[in-house]
Image (cartoon, rainbow, N blue to C red):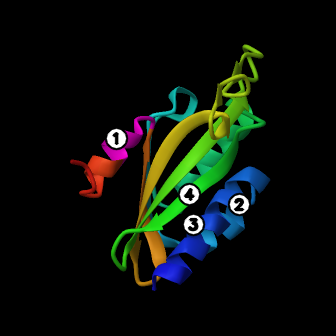
Amino acid sequence: MSHENLEAVQAVISAVNDRDLDRYLAHCTESIQLETPWAAVEGVYEGPDAIRRLFADLRDTLPDFHLVIERLEPIGSDRVLAFLRASATGRASGIAAGAGVLSATGRGIPSANVYDFAGGKIRRIRVFLDRQEALEAVGLSE
């Protein structure tokens, strides 16, 4: 299942970037849960209606929010760890977040997402701004 899971994660990240809610939800369970620390959309979003609200929140507060995949790692048969870079500009402030952050791997704010699967669909997404915390969450920390 890990190959299909990797494809599902790529698809939902692409759907976020394209603001394609239907494509996003097609890869999620009805009980999808998203936990995010991003200030503009911080909190826990549970279920399809909440994900719709997340997409609306992104449109309203961070209209150019964009994720770039650095690396995807299958963790067992039902989990994927994604190392990402995010960039966005606040609609109200006009302040760019991540656009000017340059590191050895590129521009954007580094983050990591943990995707948990059930029945071939994503059931929970946890977003971490600290990659070490994400590694600990999946049991890969020293």
Residue that label 4 marks: 71
111 above or below 95? below
Mark whose residue sits in front, 4 or 2:
4
Cα separation, mark 1 vs mark 3, equals 20 Å
Q: Is residue 131 magenta?
A: yes
Quadrant position of residue 109: top right
Q: For marks 4 and 3, give the CA distance.
A: 11 Å
Dot 3 falls on a residue whose secondary structure is helix
**Residue 53 at x, y percent in the picture:** 60, 46
For disc 3, the marked residue is 9
Earlier in the chain: of badge 2 and badge 3, it is 3
Name which residue type carries label 2.
Ala
Q: Is residue 136 magenta?
A: no
Q: What is the C-alpha distance between the residues marked 2 and 3?
A: 10 Å
- Taking 103 as reference, is 140 left or right? left
- At horizontal 57% and vertical 47% (from top left) the residue drawn is 84
Element marked by disc 1: helix
Query: 108 or 32: nearer the eye?
Result: 108
Which tag, 1 or 2, sits closer to the chain's start?
2
Q: Residue at x 73, y 27 (%)?
A: 99
Q: Say which element carries label 2.
A: helix
Q: Amino acid at mark 4?
A: Arg
Q: Which residue position is annotated with label 2?
A: 15
Q: Amino acid at mark 1?
A: Gln
Looking at this view, is 97 or 93 the one in front?
97
Q: Secondary structure at mark 4?
A: strand
- Give the mark toward the camera: 2 or 3: 3
Which mark sits nearer the N-terminus, 4 or 2? 2
**Magenta span dominant secondary structure:** helix
Q: 47 or 125, which is in the foreground? A: 125
Q: Give the crowd class for mark 1: few <14, some 14-19, many >=20 residues within 10 Å.
A: some
